[in-house]
Image (cartoon, rainbow, N blue to C red):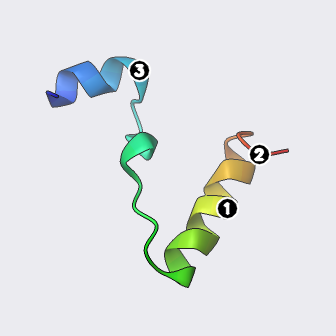
């Protein structure tokens, strides 16, 4: 998938956020709250 195609639907590219460590999980949770993806 080309970057310009991703930008149309996910300009921050959050759909490709890797979660392999506790730190990354913590960051994913923070982002979810910040972006109102998790209430």
Q: Quadrant of residue 13?
A: top left
Secondary structure, mark 3, is: helix
Measured Cα–Cα span from mark 1 to mark 2: 8 Å
Q: Using a 10 Å C-alpha cutoff, classify the residue at mark 3 as few (fewer than 14 neighbours), some (14 to 19) or many (20 or more).
A: few
CB contact under 8 Å: marks 2 and 3 = no
Which residue, given by chain and number where applicable, does mark 2 sit on?
A: 38
Which residue, given by chain and number where applicable, does mark 3 sit on?
A: 9
Measured Cα–Cα span from mark 2 to mark 3: 19 Å
For the point 48% across and 80% down, which residue is it?
21
Measured Cα–Cα span from mark 1 to mark 3: 21 Å
Which residue, given by chain and number where applicable, does mark 1 sit on?
A: 29
For the point 70% across and 40% down, which residue is it?
37
Picture disc at residue 21: none
CB contact under 8 Å: marks 1 and 2 = yes
For the point 77% across and 45% down, which residue is it?
38
Q: Using a 10 Å C-alpha cutoff, classify the residue at mark 2 as few (fewer than 14 neighbours), some (14 to 19) or many (20 or more).
A: few
- Residue 36, horizontal then vertical, whole percent: 74, 39
- Residue 16, horizontal then vertical, whole percent: 36, 47
Q: Is residue 36 left or right of residue 4?
A: right
Secondary structure, mark 1, is: helix
Furthest residue in direction bottom, as rendered: 22
Q: Earlier in the sequence, mark 1 or mark 3?
A: 3
For the point 39% across and 61% down, which residue is it?
18
Name the quadrant of the N terminus: top left
Q: Compared to 9, does 35 lie above or below? A: below
Q: Compared to 18, does 33 lie above or below? A: above
Q: Using a 10 Å C-alpha cutoff, classify the residue at mark 1 as few (fewer than 14 neighbours), some (14 to 19) or many (20 or more).
A: some
């Amino acid at each position: 998938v080309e970057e310009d195609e991703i930008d149309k639907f996910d300009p921050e590219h959050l759909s490709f956020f890797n979660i392999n460590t506790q730190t990354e999980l913590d960051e994913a949770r923070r982002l979810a709250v910040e972006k109102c993806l998790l209430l």
